[in-house]
Image: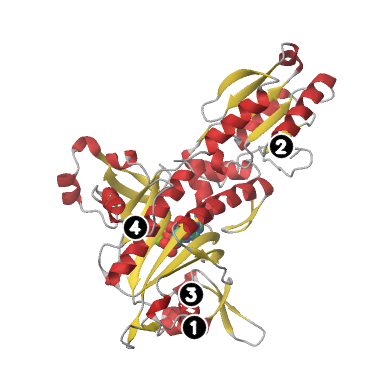
């Protein structure tokens, strides 16, 4: 992509109402533009990251046995009356009327709808288990939308729903999502810690929030430091096998948000040196809730003996748009973003220091076409402008590799490559640059 053709409206001033780094940087780097409280347009740079995050989420859902579909954003009130949640949900639900005066709503979540879809299609225990998911916009009329995409009103969520015959089977579905979440966040360069969460009246131990540690997080958390060093399940994990050992490995260590925190238990289970009390961002939430929706909504299947069995359900959310904020909170400096390669809007930026100079133009065009042909995503800055301005812009948008081409380097046959993660620079032979960069991109994209 040539910068002159792209749309990258940077903000010079730091927006006054943006309190945290990720919100400030997303606005300044031209990733989002506010259209109302908690409502954002996704500008091209931000949209590219959103799509990459969404794709990683999708791949790991699929790997774990999830089946993708798409449910509408607009739902009928009737459906929510079946579960009793239409009145219970309160002011967070955006309620709408159509021209026929029918009560509708913009979905804040999809338990009711998926239960209706399931009960219409599965009548026998032989149709179980089922694990369905979609990635769709939600609306919640939050009291305090803030921190940009972290707590929006309109936001993109992956929500999956499991249907099983009994509790042990439901636990296996739960474990599949647990393991999938560990891989999902790790592939984005994040360490997300599963923490015991409140199960409400259902009870049991099958609810976890996945929390990324960050000073600006809204949750207060307490955990065992050793959780940060655990390895996530590899790509070769067999999701049909027993995953309980993986879950046990993570849940033996203490980890709780303040709602579930038990100070005595914490003190007795975690040595002082391993105690970690911090703040965190909830990027995912998995939840087994049994018959909460299936019973009132009559989602039952015929069992082996012909008798009806109410199905056991769970739901599993990931805040896809919130993740942009979380990733920036974990990867930035004073100058801008530092995107991990797998979610970067482009793998590399190519800076032509002297557009119009025949040598510089030729070298840049050659590099640009070689890299593009090798599937490296390059943002090529061929615009006029001072070098300082160009460097500052590249630092702000935070592409993992910055290739700088100018007459002085070219005189020695060299270009300069900077890694944004640690801001180290290296001189590379112009001839060798395409391979060098391809290798660096491949290395950055690899994950166990
Ligand atoms: P929170 O406690 O942050 O309000 P929640 O518990 O209400 O979130 P869930 O219903 O568990 O959220 O939704 C699943 C995921 O969707 C959350 O883990 C979070 O990552 C994301 N999410 C929820 N609300 C928002 C929001 N207002 N803006 C952006 N992402 C959100
Ligand atoms: Mg939650």
Q: Residue at x 73, y 32 (%)?
A: 370
Classify mark 3: helix, strand or loop.
helix
Mark 1 → mark 2, Cα distance in angstroms: 48 Å
Say which residue label 1 marks.
Answer: 120
Q: Is residue 239 left or right of residue 12?
A: left
Residue 372's label in the rendered image is 2
CB atoms of marks 3 and 2 within 8 Å: no
Residue 340 visible in this rendered orientation of the protein: no
Mark 3 → mark 4, Cα distance in angstroms: 26 Å
Front in this rendered view, residue 12 or 55: 55
Q: Nearer the viewer, mark 3 or mark 4?
A: 4
Residue at the top extreme? Answer: 412
Mark 3 → mark 2, Cα distance in angstroms: 42 Å
Circle 4 Cα neighbour tier, 10 Å, few/some/many (<14 / 14–19 / ≥20): few
* Quarter occupied by the C terminus: top left
Say how many tags the image has: 4
**Residue 177 rendering spot, x and y as whole percentages:** 40, 58
Q: Nearer the viewer, mark 4 or mark 2?
A: 4
Q: Residue at x 72, y 37 (%)?
A: 373
Mark 4 → mark 2, Cα distance in angstroms: 41 Å
Mark 3 → mark 1, Cα distance in angstroms: 10 Å
Q: Quadrant of residue 102?
A: bottom right
Classify mark 4: helix, strand or loop.
loop
- Ranked by sequence position, the earlier of labels 3 and 1 is 3
**Residue 311 rendering spot, x and y as whole percentages:** 36, 78
Classify mark 1: helix, strand or loop.
helix
Taking the image in four quarters, ligand 2 sits in the one at: bottom left
Say which residue label 4 marks.
Answer: 241
Q: Nearer the viewer, mark 1 or mark 4?
A: 4
Residue 110's label in the rendered image is none
């Amino acid at each position: 992509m040539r910068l002159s053709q792209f749309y990258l409206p940077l903000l010079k001033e730091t927006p006054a109402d943006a309190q945290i780094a990720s919100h400030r940087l997303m606005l300044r780097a031209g990733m989002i533009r506010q259209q109302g409280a908690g409502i954002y347009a996704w500008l091209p740079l931000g949209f590219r990251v959103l799509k990459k995050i969404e794709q990683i989420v999708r791949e790991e859902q699929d790997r774990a046995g999830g089946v993708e579909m798409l449910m509408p954003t607009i739902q009928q009130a009737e459906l929510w009356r079946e579960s009793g949640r239409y009145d219970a949900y309160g002011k967070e639900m955006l309620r709408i009327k159509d021209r026929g005066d029918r009560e509708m709503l913009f979905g804040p979540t999809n338990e009711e709808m998926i239960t209706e879809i399931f009960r219409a299609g599965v009548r026998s225990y032989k149709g179980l288990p089922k694990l369905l998911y979609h990635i769709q916009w939600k609306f919640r009329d939050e009291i305090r939308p803030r921190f940009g995409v972290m707590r929006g009103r309109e936001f993109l969520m992956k929500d999956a729903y499991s249907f099983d015959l009994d509790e042990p089977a439901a636990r296996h579905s739960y474990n599949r999502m647990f393991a999938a979440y560990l891989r999902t966040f790790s592939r984005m360069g994040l360490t997300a810690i599963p923490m015991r969460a409140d199960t409400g009246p259902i009870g049991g131990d099958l609810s976890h929030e996945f929390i990324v540690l960050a000073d600006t997080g809204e949750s207060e958390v307490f955990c065992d430091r050793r959780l940060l060093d655990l390895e996530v399940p590899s790509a070769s994990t067999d999701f049909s096998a027993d995953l309980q050992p993986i879950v046990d490995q993570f849940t033996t260590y203490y980890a709780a948000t303040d709602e579930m925190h038990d100070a005595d238990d914490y003190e007795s289970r975690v040595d002082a040196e391993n105690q970690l009390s911090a703040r965190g961002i909830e990027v995912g939430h998995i939840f087994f809730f049994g018959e909460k929706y299936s019973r009132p909504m009559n989602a039952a299947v015929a069992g082996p003996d012909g008798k009806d069995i109410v199905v056991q359900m769970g739901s599993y959310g990931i805040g896809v748009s919130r993740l942009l904020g979380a990733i920036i909170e974990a990867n930035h400096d004073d100058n801008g973003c530092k995107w991990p390669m797998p979610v970067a809007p482009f793998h590399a930026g190519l800076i032509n220091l002297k557009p119009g100079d025949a040598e510089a133009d030729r070298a840049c065009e050659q590099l640009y076409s070689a890299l593009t042909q090798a599937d490296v995503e390059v943002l090529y800055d061929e615009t006029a402008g001072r070098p300082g301005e160009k460097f500052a812009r590249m630092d702000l948008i935070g592409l993992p590799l910055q290739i700088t081409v100018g007459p002085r380097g070219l005189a020695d046959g060299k270009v300069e490559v900077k890694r944004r993660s640690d801001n180290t620079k290296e001189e590379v032979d112009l001839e060798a640059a395409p391979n060098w960069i391809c290798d660096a991109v491949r290395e950055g994209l690899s994950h166990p």
